[in-house]
């Protein structure tokens, strides 16, 4: 009987070990895919131009997954070696902490969460099991550990001095890559605005108010009520602008977008998504919303997955970017891949030259391509990371 019990326990331990070792990778392979469709040829002109670009991507969810960001992975869309291959100067990495079961673009409640099981399976610290705020702090720690272990190849960026130093370093060899922290939904505040200061202290410099469900700051475009900003939401927006944190309207309800754009005193961004004019999905921005973001001096980050551009081809990405350019000007066009965000795309970040080629094919000039691929983002970040003096108090 004793031997039998020992064998059962060993089998259970082996089973649990296999679960923790294999399950996170299996889940990610199922959610972050490359569709395998053929890519168009890339010209020598595109390759040469691409190597001169300062490329910035406004949104990736790579910190969610349990892989070594410094090593080339056989799954997902992004890691440091692939960012280097794609010639990316600065990658904005989001902390995604909660995702409702049965997630869809139409209507989700915040009563359930898929990410909690992933937190367990990835053996994250116990403090992250029941706290969304602690999950965000863990993502910050994860990035800073990777940066410290990278021998200078990966630099965190949290202010204009660090951004300037990154750009200066990229003028030499070897190339370095920057990373800036963002938050996908300020439900991570857990109702306490003081937590915003702690997140700022942890290096977060961009944040969206909502994700796929309504919260105590605002309604989500995918929520149940889809309401506007709450008093807490207005207070948080004002404090973010004062501190030098970029406000992101991605996933915010139409009512919330309207109210936020009216009160914004600094450039806002839509970090990842598409435009209704080229892909009529409720996830995407109307022309009026695009004009509103542009009026703040902000950016529209175009994503690469099918619901953002109604296809995964580089040409469809360029088509959405062209619409923004033609509507409000090239200065408001940016990249917002949503890599590693449970998306299916045509290419990973190592093949970003495909976007450069698609923009050439769409008739963009070299200067327009420089702006869209990262120049605009550098301009907005450089201005938006500077705290206001004196700080503006919430109304």
Image: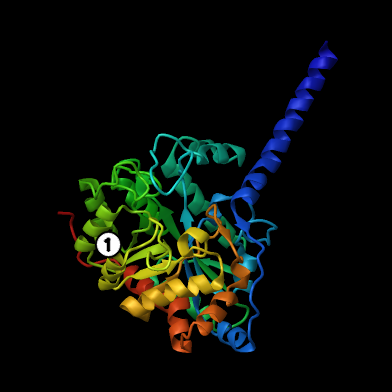
Q: Is 389 left, or right, of 299 in this rendering? A: left
Farthest residue toward the right?
3
Res 180 visible: no
Q: 185 or 257, which is in the foreground?
A: 257
Q: Which residue is mark 1?
A: 241
**Viewport quadrant of the N terminus:** top right
Label 1 neighbour load within 10 Å: few <14, some 14-19, many 20+: many
Question: Could you say where residue 388 lies in the image, as x and y percent from the top left?
Answer: 24, 67
**Viewport quadrant of the C terminus:** bottom left
Farthest residue toward the left?
395
> What is the tally of numbered marks visible in this picture?
1
Q: Is 54 left, or right, of 217 in this rendering? A: right
Q: Is residue 376 above or below residue 278?
A: below
Q: Is 341 left, or right, of 18 in this rendering? A: left
Which SS class for mark 1? helix
Res 275 visible: yes
Question: Could you say where residue 17 lies in the image, as x and y percent from the top left?
Answer: 72, 35
Farthest residue toward the top?
1
Question: Could you say where residue 317 lies in the image, as x and y percent from the top left?
Answer: 49, 71
* Residue located 43% across and 74% down the image: 321
Question: Could you say where residue 237 lies in the image, as x and y percent from the top left?
Answer: 26, 56
């Amino acid at each position: 009987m004793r031997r039998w019990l020992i064998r059962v326990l060993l089998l259970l331990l082996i089973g649990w070990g296999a679960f923790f070792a294999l399950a996170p990778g299996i889940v990610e392979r199922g959610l972050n895919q490359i569709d395998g469709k053929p890519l168009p040829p890339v010209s020598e002109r595109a390759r040469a131009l691409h190597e001169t670009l300062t490329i910035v991507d406004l949104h990736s969810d790579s910190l969610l997954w349990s892989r070594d960001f410094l090593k080339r992975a056989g799954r997902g869309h992004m890691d440091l070696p692939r960012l280097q291959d794609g010639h990316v100067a600065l990658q904005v990495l989001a902390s995604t902490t909660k995702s409702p079961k049965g997630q869809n673009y139409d209507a989700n409640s915040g009563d359930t969460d898929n990410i909690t099981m992933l937190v367990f399976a990835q053996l994250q610290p116990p403090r992250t099991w029941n706290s969304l705020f602690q999950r965000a702090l863990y993502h910050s720690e994860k990035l800073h550990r990777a940066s410290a272990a990278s021998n200078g190849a990966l630099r965190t960026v949290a202010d204009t001095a660090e951004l300037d130093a990154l750009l200066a370093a990229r003028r030499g060899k070897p190339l370095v890559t920057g990373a800036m922290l963002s938050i996908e939904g300020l439900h991570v505040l857990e109702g306490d605005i003081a937590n915003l200061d702690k997140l700022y202290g942890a290096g977060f410099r961009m944040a969206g108010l909502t994700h796929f469900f309504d919260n105590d700051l605002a309604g989500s475009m995918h929520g149940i009520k889809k309401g506007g900003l709450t008093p807490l939401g207005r207070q948080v927006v004002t404090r973010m602008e004062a501190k030098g944190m970029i406000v992101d309207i991605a996933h915010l309800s139409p009512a919330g977008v309207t109210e936020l754009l009216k009160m914004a005193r600094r450039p806002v961004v839509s970090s990842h998504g598409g435009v209704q004019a080229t892909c009529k999905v409720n996830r995407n921005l109307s022309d009026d919303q695009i004009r509103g973001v542009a009026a703040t001096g902000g950016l529209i980050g175009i994503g690469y997955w099918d619901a953002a551009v109604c296809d995964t081809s580089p040409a469809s990405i360029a088509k959405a970017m062209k619409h923004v350019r033609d509507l409000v000007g090239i200065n408001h066009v940016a990249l917002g891949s949503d890599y590693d965000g449970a998306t299916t795309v045509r290419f990973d970040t190592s093949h970003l030259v495909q976007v450069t080629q698609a923009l050439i094919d769409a008739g963009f000039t070299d200067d327009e391509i420089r702006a869209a691929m990262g120049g605009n983002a550098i301009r907005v970040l450089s201005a938006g990371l500077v705290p206001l003096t004196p700080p503006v108090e919430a109304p």
